[in-house]
Image (tube, rainbow, N blue to C red):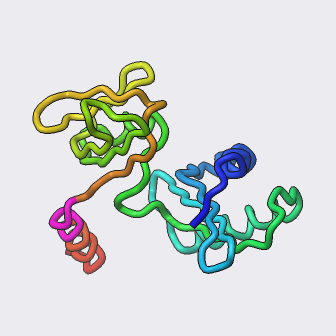
Amino acid sequence: MTTNRKLVSSLWTMIEPVLEADGIELVEVEYLLSGGSWTLRLYIDTPDGVTLDDCTTISRQVGAFLDAEDPIEQHYNLEVSSPGINRVVRKLSDFERFSGRRARIRTAHKIDGRKNFLGILRGTRDATVIIEVENSLMEINAENIEKAHLETPPDEILQQSLRKKALSMGG
């Protein structure tokens, strides 16, 4: 699996304004070589969540835009999906928005001898993410964050699923 950071950054810059005009948040962009073929994967979100129709509409819209702009040399497949329950947390505003939620953060450089942290997000201060790990607050410079995502415990996923099912059945 290979990724091209410069191309991903360029695609992000091109695609994000197109989506924002329709009130859609671009959560993540991946450009991956897997099994001999390239895939451009976009993760999108809205305040009300993402439906299959949203993904289809955005796929057509972004596909037409990319066909016209032609920023990618190789043949690729475009995939558009929701970020899922354990979504990526990338922007400082996301760390603030999901304050109080459990998250896993991997840093580029070690902090106190480690690079992986699991804890409760406690917001931000300037360009620093605050996470509560093992009953102590840690401050991680956003530049040092390699990857971060929400980590929803399985029992909470089950509870959410049961609530949705009860609501859909009128209960």
Is 10 left, or right, of 27 in this rendering?
right
Q: Main secondary structure of the magenta part?
A: helix
Q: Quadrant of residue 101?
A: top left
Residue at the extreme left: 135
Q: Residue at x 75, y 47 (%)?
A: 14
Q: Where is 85 relative to 18, above or below? A: below
Q: Where is 101 relative to 128, above or below? A: below
What percent of the width, then of the height, locates residue 116?
29, 45
What percent of the width, then of the height, locates residue 35?
61, 80
What percent of the width, then of the height, locates residue 45?
51, 56
Is 89 left, or right, of 153 in this rendering?
right
What percent of the width, then of the height, locates residue 161?
25, 72
Tell me the quarter of the image containing the N terminus. Answer: bottom right
Q: Residue at x 36, y 27 (%)?
A: 124
Tell me if I can see residue 18 in this picture.
no
Magenta stretch holds residue 140: no
Q: How many marks?
A: 0
Q: Where is 122 relative to 36, above or below? A: above
Tell me the quarter of the image containing the C terminus. Answer: bottom left
Tell me if I can see residue 82 in this picture.
yes
Q: Residue at x 72, y 51 (%)?
A: 7
Q: Where is 9 relative to 68, above or below? A: above
Residue at the extreme front: 113
Q: Residue at x 79, y 73 (%)?
A: 75
Out of 160 and 34, give the one closest to the viewer: 34
Magenta stretch holds residue 157: yes
Q: Quadrant of residue 39?
A: bottom right
Residue at the extreme right: 68
Out of 16 and 10, give the one closest to the viewer: 10
Q: Which segment is the magenta one?
A: 153-158
